[in-house]
Image: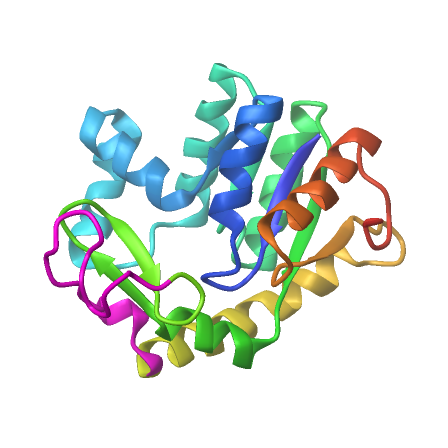
Amino acid sequence: MNLIFLGPPGAGKGTQAKILAERFGYRQLSTGDILRANRLAGTPLGHEAKPFMDSGGLVPDDLIIRMIAAEFEGGGPFIFDGFPRTVAQAEALDELLTSKRQSSVAVLFEVDMSVLIERLTGRWTHVASGRVYNARYAPPKVSGIDDVTGEPLEQRPDDREETIRTRLAVYEEQTAPLIAYYDDPANPRLVSVDALAPIDAVTRELVSLVADNGVAGPVAG
């Protein structure tokens, strides 16, 4: 069973995808990673996408779907992270999965946006190593200083409140139709998890979902 992760930036989708990849052999697919990999490898699809990427334009849905279809040659199952972003993309993905005789369920990472903003704006990074701290939830031993090197930490532009609020507003606008699409009473394929719960608790919910092979309605804790 393939999983489609829906949730705002910072909801922990990437963390949970890595855990499920280790436990169940899932492959995490994000459009950004696929585009970069194809471009770096110089594939025909990468060459086709290059003009859009260079101009900062949106890569057409049909090209994204063809890249995803090519990933099926390496085997699955998959966690789709950040895709689909529109109902049209969701419909195209359904067609692809049907052609492969595969199923999917969408997992909504539910969060309180005010708490999420507080969490994200507290992030500070040691750029050289990628170590991430949080001023409230996982602070460094000395404020503003990396525990290992003693070098100063930085707050990335993406972690500033104005930027985060803009990204979350875009997410809510784009995702609402997707929630309705996957929660269609005629074919309900949406479950939800409390993304602000401890990481282990979220993992247990997802493991239950995978073990049950997907069920309609909330996942039991």
Which residue is nearer to you in this view: 71 or 217?
217
Residue ranking furthest to the top: 74
Q: Residue sitting at 85 percent across and 42 percent down? A: 215
Q: Height in image: 118 above or below 42?
A: below
Residue 112 horizontal/vertical position (percent): 61, 75
Protein image colouring = rainbow
Residue at the right extreme of this rendering: 186
In magenta stretch: residue 149: yes
Between 138 and 60, the one lying in front of the other is 138
The x and y percentages for residue 202 are 66, 49
Work out whether 56 lies above or below 203: below
> In which image quadrant can residue 16 be found?
top right
Of residues 159 and 40, the one nearer the viewer is: 159
* Range shown magenta: 139-161
The residue at 65%/67% (across/down) is 177
**Whole-percent x, y for residue 122 in the image:** 36, 72
Query: 11 or 147, which lies in front?
Result: 147
205 relative position to 3: left or right: right
Horizontally, residue 170 falls left or right of residue 133, namely right
Considering the whole magenta stretch, tell me its main secondary structure.
loop
Q: Is residue 143 magenta?
A: yes
Q: Is residue 132 left or right of residue 184?
A: left
